Amino acid sequence: MKTELQNKIIEVLKTIYDPEIPVDIYELGLVYAIDIDEAQFATITMTLTSPSCPVAETLPPDVENKVASVEGITGCKVEITWEPPWDKSMMSQEAMLELGFL
């Protein structure tokens, strides 16, 4: 059940894009963890490309709202972390290909 919900959450995360980079936040490697508790409440641990990211105020609530709308999820909280700091090596091969790094 948890894996199915995590997969649904990943699909939603793949619809959310960093406005400066034409790649979704999941493929960019900004999502570090997806945890779902017994009450089906999701906690997303993620980072931003930089502490001065222009969407630092708007992206986390957007993620919370979209993940909370996933069928079977009762709510969502985003926790922003800066450890480890994000860098290009965290991107998926798909993202690197899209951005011309491969």
Image: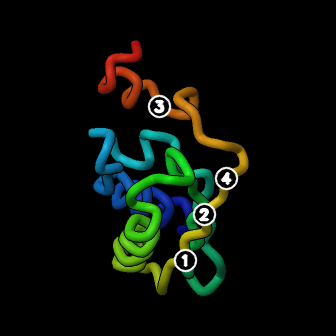
Residue denoted by label 2: 80
SS of the residue at dot 3? loop
Distance CA(mark 2)–CA(mark 4): 7 Å
Q: Looking at the image, is 36 positioned above or below residue 18? A: below
Residue denoted by label 1: 77
Q: Where residue 79 sits in the image (x, y, percent)? A: 61, 68
Distance CA(mark 3)–CA(mark 2): 20 Å
Q: In this view of the protein, which residue sits in the foreground, 96 or 50?
A: 50
Q: Residue type at mark 4?
A: Trp
Q: Residue type at mark 2?
A: Ile
Q: Are marks 2 and 4 in contact (CB under 8 Å)?
A: yes
**Front of the two marks 3 and 2:** 2
Residue denoted by label 3: 92
SS of the residue at dot 1? strand
Estimate how packed mark 3 is, as few (under 14), some (14 to 19) or many (20 or more) residues with alpha carbons within 10 Å. some
Distance CA(mark 1)–CA(mark 3): 24 Å
Q: In this view of the protein, which residue sits in the foreground, 75 or 85?
A: 85
Estimate how packed mark 1 is, as few (under 14), some (14 to 19) or many (20 or more) residues with alpha carbons within 10 Å. some
